[in-house]
Image (cartoon, helix red, strand yellow):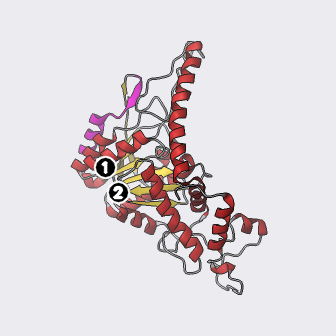
Amino acid sequence: PEEGWDDRSIELFLDELALMDSNNYKNNCGVGEREARFACKLVESKYKGMGHGIGRSGDIAAIQPKAAGSSLLMKLANYMILDAMKISGLDCIKGALILPLATGMALTTTFLTLKQQRKSAKYIIWPRIDQKTCLKSIFTANLEPIIIENILDGEELRTDLDSLKEAVQSKDPEEILCVFSTTSCFAPRGYDKLEEIAKICKEAGVPHVINNAYGLQCTKIANSINIASRKGRVDVIVQSTDKNFMVPVGGSVVSAPDKTFIEQVSKIYPGRASGSPISDVFITLLSLGRQGYKKLLTDRKDNFVYLKEQLSIVADKHGERVFNTPNNKISIGVSLNQSNPQA
């Protein structure tokens, strides 16, 4: 909605959706193995009586005959998240899917989907960031990372394009699952050089997966992804729901310029899934509305500038400095030269 809904209106809508699920039919007595039974009234209240989850065994995005309300909620949430991503500036996105998985497992699911298309692939070329989840997402998919060390550009760590291109050219393209780039990272590292990486991937015929975990809130990152998609190759962009929409941990958004790939991701997920992370995003977006979400994006940008200014004052007072990292508009790095002179 353009303007956010009040809490009572949202609760009324959720109640109406819940009444469309078969376990909430007044005269229904289910005898199957999946009937959304609740032993605890508190749990039933927490989920508004919607216990069927989402999807079916062959497709996490499929409609459940027994759960029309939950299925409708899921479909609406995916359309709404796509709209929110476009508000954030990601115009290149054509399809998006909220998964009940945190970012790391969503990345693994993405790699496994690509693996179905590239049977001989065993390597992922990855410009290094010091974050365990990225590595574990690769290992869990039974793939081998080729780690590209970064280079220092002023006070900022950036992508070593020459080493990356050399790594791509050193392997048979069919053995490379993808180049795995990153937008959101801790300063003094800047986000990867997406446009240049996308061009290398396009020339080599290698997929390009972007870890955009908490980058959806940054318009500069969104613009960089758009340019990369237009001038080169971008296959998938993965982001976190909790880091971008302030909901509990447990969800992520897999998005792509080609919605066919999103359909493939939804079909690789085994079995049904929890609807809770999807419901959290759905309720939050209804509450914020388009105007509320736009305000959050503006406020974050203003707060970043203010925080950096104030940190610079504090750092200068103690003989330290804030690093100059123009390609990181989310994280701020501060020197610690005086904290332990012997370190």
Q: Check disc 1: other Cα within 10 Å, few if <14, some if 14-19, many if 20+.
A: many
Label drawn at residue 257: 2
Residue 95 position, x and y percent, is 40, 61
Q: 70 above or below 182?
A: below
- Of labels 2 and 1, earlier in sequence is 1
User: What residue is drawn where x is 36% and y is 46%?
Assistant: 225
Depth check, front residue: 330 or 178: 330
294 or 67, which lies in front? Answer: 294
Q: Which residues are magenta?
A: 155-171
Name the residue that disc number 1 marks.
Answer: 229
Q: Amino acid at mark 1?
A: Ser
Question: Residue 10, located in which quarter of the rendered image?
Answer: bottom right
Give the quadrant of the C terminus: top right
Q: CA distance from mark 2 to mark 1?
A: 8 Å
Magenta-drawn stretch contains 166: yes
- Disc 2 marks a residue whose amino acid type is Pro
Q: Is residue 156 left or right of residue 39?
A: left
